Image (cartoon, rainbow, N blue to C red):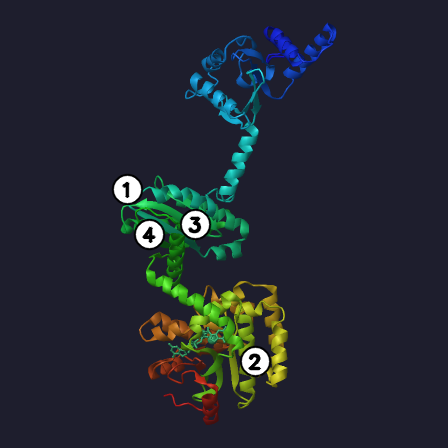
Amino acid sequence: MGPQGEPTPRLRCATEAAALDAVRDTSDVDVTSLQTQVARLEVALDNMSQGLCMFDHAARLVICNARYHELFEIPPLRLRSGMSQEDVCAVLIAHGCYPPSVTVDAILETTRASLQAGGAMPILRELVNGRVLSILFRPLKDGGWVSTFEDVTEQRRSAAKIAHLAGHDALTDLANARALREEGRALMAQTSALAPVLAMHYLDLDRFKFVNDTHGHEAGDELLRLVAGRLQAVLRRGDRIGRLGGDEFAILQRVPTVHAALEFATLLVDAVSAPFGLSVGPVAIGASVGTATRVGLVEDLEPLLHEADLALRQAKLSGRGTTTLFDPEMSDLARQRRSLEAELHVALAAEQFELHYQPLVSLDRDRNRIVGVEALVRWRHPVRGLVSPATFISIAEETGLIVPLGAWVLGQACRDAAGWPAHVVVAVNVSSMQMRHKAFAADVFAILEETGLAPARLEIEITESALLDESDTIMDNLNRLRSAGIRFAMDDFGTGYSSLSYLRRFPFDKIKIDRSFMQDAETSADALAIIRAVAGLGASLGITTLVEGVETAQQLAMARAEGVGQAQGYLLSRPQPGAVIADLLKQDRLPGD
Ligand code: C2E
Ligand code: CA
Ligand code: CA
């Protein structure tokens, strides 16, 4: 049957001929059975899901089935058996089946080439009606051939969809990391006098985690989509963008100068800094960008990505909302960090850590009496000498080594303190990662039991960020330890987000005012006002206050005048090795003012 339902009479005789052909070799065939066979063959042909046509040795059409007409959307009467292949092609072209680029000669040529190659490889053709056909040419013994036409439009569409999904980030529909590398090839290979500089911008959102944590993942997803939209809006023609994962994006472009690249990086930061209207309400975030550049042709994108990543880390360190250009020194720093990371793993087993202690001094009634000491860890590196915790604590946190290291610090500090006068408290810094372990409280109890230190003589210093993640495990550990009589100090107060709310969430015994406030107190009325306010708040809540970083006699006098309870700083004493501290504690008091 043809596409409109009518039979295709003109082809019937051709079909019979073909059927006769097909049975030519068989003997003893009577005419009725031959007719039955022809009828069957005809039904079979017209019900094939594939389009089919057969040409003889002189390239004349023998038969073609209904599906063939359907696929090309041509009326059944237009093709007659006996037409040359050239004429068949001309009909299809005249009917507008093929895009204009396809000519009769081209089709003949393709057919010839395919038949010569044995016809094993299908040829894909896209028709103007949107169909995609997979065509096979099978040579016949007599020099003719059969062509089959399979509609692979759907297959192709889903394959394209899969390819799109594999190359695109489903959330923002931007290219993913792999696709960006792929798309970047063109930009790498194409430099011009006007835009010789290839720039890679690595962008990371500031405060995204905060939005995600406080408003939930849906708000986070919504935000990422909006960010993607804003970034796309600042791109110029030819720029490539991708989402590398999480809240990280990369933009690759050709620009005239390195300066232009940096200007563009600033545009990216600006685009993200205006508030976003999310369903949950407006939120303000920001972005940092690291930029790396190359002049001329670029063969490998990886070093550029790596440099942009290093520059981004630097941008993040120098504050939020900044852009930073890669500098070779950053590679040295990163290399150093990696080697430290490797060495840190052996340091614990090799007993390269030691504790120094810095006195905590009471400012009220007992003038300058040492009421406690803070344990500060040091790494005695065989080559580098004494390494500051400012260098290695963050690496230990990233690698998880902080857990065994922190346990060692707690054990050593309690052992040392057990030998000191009974009124001296030992303060130990504890990372949130340690407290996220269920067994943390139990481990502390075991250490106290083993060393015989009274729980009230241990003070645990944590920063607000430890409470930020509000995990049940952390809260559970804190509460168990506190019920046992262990004290808690909030460290670096004033450097975090919304410090006061944490005081409500957990009953701290002490607030340590970050040393940046003491540093500024002499010149900034605001800093001094904050010290005053915290001292007043502490007094009314019954929480001890301490100022960190007291370096001058004048600062000490100010702290005392504002009613701060305790002080710590180089003026009073630098952190000292355990043996020195044991001697100091015998004197009990420090010279101060
Ligand atoms: P932190 O807890 O704020 O410790 C106080 C830091 O300020 C110490 O640096 C101390 O030497 C320094 N400091 C004390 N007085 C003054 C002063 O008058 N002026 C100035 N400019 N600085 C002063 P340190 O020992 O380098 O420790 C740095 C940070 O490393 C500590 O800051 C703490 O966050 C972390 N840390 C140290 N030991 C440990 C530890 O055992 N575990 C963990 N998790 N972190 C530790
Ligand atoms: Ca501390
Ligand atoms: Ca501190």
Q: Which label's residue is closer to the chain start, 1 or 3?
A: 1
Q: Is residue 423 left or right of residue 569?
A: right
From the viewer's perspective, is the residue at label 2 or at label 4 nearer? 4
| The N terminus - image quarter | top right
Per the model, the C-alpha gap separating discs 1 and 3 is 26 Å
User: Which amino acid is tagged 3?
Assistant: Phe
Task: Please give the residue where the numbered disc 3 appears in the rendered image.
Answer: 249
Q: Secondary structure at mark 4?
A: strand
User: Which is nearer the eye, 324 or 478?
Assistant: 324
Q: Between tags 1 and 3, which lies in front?
A: 1
Position of residue 553 in the picture relative to residue 472 (left or right): left
Q: How many neighbours does mark 1 have within 10 angstroms: few (below 14), some (14-19), or many (20 or more)?
A: few
Residue 484 visible, this angle = no
> Would you name the residue on which mark 4 appears?
293
Q: Are marks 1 and 4 in contact (CB under 8 Å)?
A: no
Q: Are marks 3 and 4 in contact (CB under 8 Å)?
A: no
